[in-house]
Image: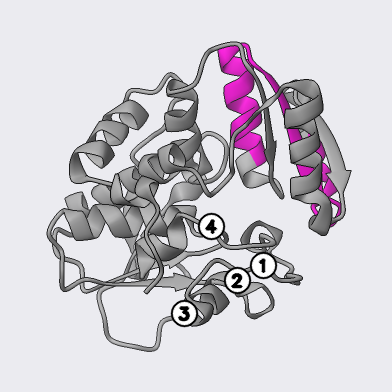
Amino acid sequence: MVDVPLSVKAITLDLLRDARETVRTSPLGVINTPMIPWCQTTLPLNIPCNIHIKLENMQRTGSFKIRGVANQFARRPKGAHFVTMSAGNYGKSFAYASKHYGSKGKVVMPETAPVSRSTLIQNFGCEVERVPTTCLMNVVNRCVQEENMTFLHSYDDLDLIAGHASLGFEVLEVMPQPDVVVVCCGGGGLLAGVAAAIKLAGCEKTRIYGVEPEGACTMYKSFIEKKPIGMDTKSIASGLAPPFAALRAVPALR
């Protein structure tokens, strides 16, 4: 068992409920996305079970990332100069929020990220710097030290994890006692938030699974090593291939 950082011990039901209200009332327009039965989709299913899918692609910026961003920006000084690292989806939400709040923003992106995502982020008024994946944190640290920027982490941040927990609460509104919840896992921010919301709400029997690409299984390897680890990730799903797992998510999920 790894030592639990103070920030993880601070994840309480009251904290998550407060973040949920912040997200729900955010001027960024976060919505309670619908959950639809699998049978209403054209996806194949060969097992007899009751499956629902939460349509986070309907968020204004196209993904769940806006939830964590809404809580992060609500708890930071307005007009500050922020820097982050992202393969695209978090960067889009970060840039959208920066424009809304009148903040300066810079997104450090891996060279492997689609150019179209860089263009969209720049259209929101944020600066983009593309670098090799192994150099992401070095460039972020340079921006913090030399340009006095404030770093907003794209998946390893307590406010972000608490904001993502709002998705877990919405799942429970539709299915109060789910048997299994399956969550995509990159760095672990969404997975940690959803798991915390569901478990702290009293669903002790609910099994929660994180799913990640075989070529970017940083969370799986972190569980084996019992500490956050990094790896040279390789996956067509660049948004699920961070160079390392979240420091706060790993102990929170064990």
* Amino acid identity at mark 3: Pro
**Residue labelled with disc 2:** 218
Mark 3 crowd level (few <14, some 14–19, many ≥20, 10 Å Cα):
few
Q: State the image quarter where residue 235 is shown.
A: bottom right
Residue 113 locus on image (x, y percent): 79, 53
Horizontal side of 11 relative to 202 (left or right) equals right
* Distance from the alpha carbon under mark 4 to that under mark 3: 33 Å
* Amino acid identity at mark 4: Ala
- Foreground: disc 2 or disc 1: 1
Closer to the chain start, of discs 3 and 1, is 3
Q: Are marks 2 and 1 in contact (CB under 8 Å)?
A: yes
Secondary structure under the numbered disc 4 in the rendered image: loop
66 is higher (above) or lower (below) than 75: below
* Distance from the alpha carbon under mark 3 to that under mark 1: 35 Å
Secondary structure under the numbered disc 1 in the rendered image: loop
Relative to the observer, which residue lies in front, 71 or 223?
A: 223
Closer to the chain start, of discs 1 and 4, is 1
Q: Quadrant of the C terminus?
A: bottom left
- Foreground: disc 3 or disc 1: 1
- Foreground: disc 3 or disc 2: 2
* Distance from the alpha carbon under mark 2 to that under mark 4: 9 Å
**Residue labelled with disc 1:** 230
**Residue labelled with disc 3:** 44
Give yes or no for residue 84 being in the magenta stretch: no
Secondary structure under the numbered disc 2 in the rendered image: helix
Closer to the chain start, of discs 2 and 1, is 2
Residue visible at 39% across and 23% down in the picture: 26
The answer to whether any part of residue 33 appears in the image is: no
The answer to whether any part of residue 161 appears in the image is: yes
* Distance from the alpha carbon under mark 3 to that under mark 2: 29 Å
Residue 153 locus on image (x, y percent): 59, 41
Closer to the chain start, of discs 2 and 4, is 2
